[in-house]
Image (cartoon, grey):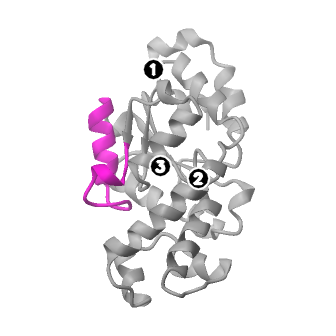
Amino acid sequence: MAFRYLILQYSTILFDFDGTLTHSLPMWMRAYQYALSQYGINLATEEVIGKCFYRPWRDLVVDFELPSITDFGAHVNVGLEAAMPEAVLFDDVENFLEACRLRGIKLGIVTSSTKKVVRTFIQEKNLEGYFGTVITADDIVNFKPHPEPVFKGLAEIGGTPETSLFVGDSSADMLAAEAAGLHKALFLPDEHLTYYDFTELRNHEPHLVFHKYSEILSRLEAVPHETADTI
């Protein structure tokens, strides 16, 4: 499949945040462990992945017999805010964002993380100028895999499903993008082997699969900037 078809057909690219732009899944691991420890529950890494990751908090509250979603969520956010300063961008993310900007592609973030966490990270990494919209947990009612946050991101940035790509690392991302009618790009870095079943993720039939941003950056940089006005 031609690379132009994969990237330059899109006027808008929406990104998931955790595990897609930043290698923050270990931070979420620590946040869940911290939150559960407040109730005297101590889980190993494998248990947190199996019992907590990508599950609604209401289900965790029932499973672990916790007082309330609000109480549990507050503990998770405390743990996440403490851990996130250690999070870093994946290699070549900023270079890819800059290459997209130069070619007139509108960029946005759609995430289930809180506005405080995401905005703080973006500011500290000097990424504010790249994103025309940042949709967080504070802006929505329904979380991915529901398409609401994707539709909201498109509305704010002025994009249409037919000309937009969603880049994510999880089943929730792929399902939300599909439900909203966007093409899907699946990011599968080696760092995620601990957290995901890659075969299961590929079963969502993404339009593009990549393991490093350098794989798509090198091809995008080969396209002259002048092609932006033909996108």
**Residue sitting at x 55%, y 8%:** 226
Q: Give me the C-alpha separation between circle 3 and circle 2.
A: 7 Å
Image quarter for residue 47?
A: bottom right
**Residue 191, how many percent across, how many down?**
72, 58
Mark 3 is surrounded, within 10 Å at the Cα level, by few (under 14), some (14 to 19) or many (20 or more) other residues, namely some
Mark 1 is surrounded, within 10 Å at the Cα level, by few (under 14), some (14 to 19) or many (20 or more) other residues, namely some
Which of the labelled discs sits on residue 84, or is there none? 2
- Asked if marks 3 and 2 touch (Cβ < 8 Å), the reply is yes
Q: Amino acid at mark 2?
A: Met
Question: Residues in magenta?
Answer: 135-158
Q: Is residue 43 left or right of residue 17?
A: right
Q: Give me the C-alpha separation between circle 3 and circle 1.
A: 33 Å
Please indicate, yes or no, whether residue 159 appears anywhere in the rendered image: no
**Residue 40, how many percent across, how many down?**
53, 88
Sequence-wise first label, 3 or 2 = 2
Q: Secondary structure at mark 3?
A: helix
Q: Amino acid at mark 3?
A: Val
Q: Is residue 144 left or right of residue 83?
A: left
The residue under label 3 is 117
Sequence-wise first label, 1 or 2 = 2
Q: Is residue 226 above or below residue 5?
A: above
Q: Mark 1 or mark 2: which is in front?
A: 2
- Residue 136 magenta: yes
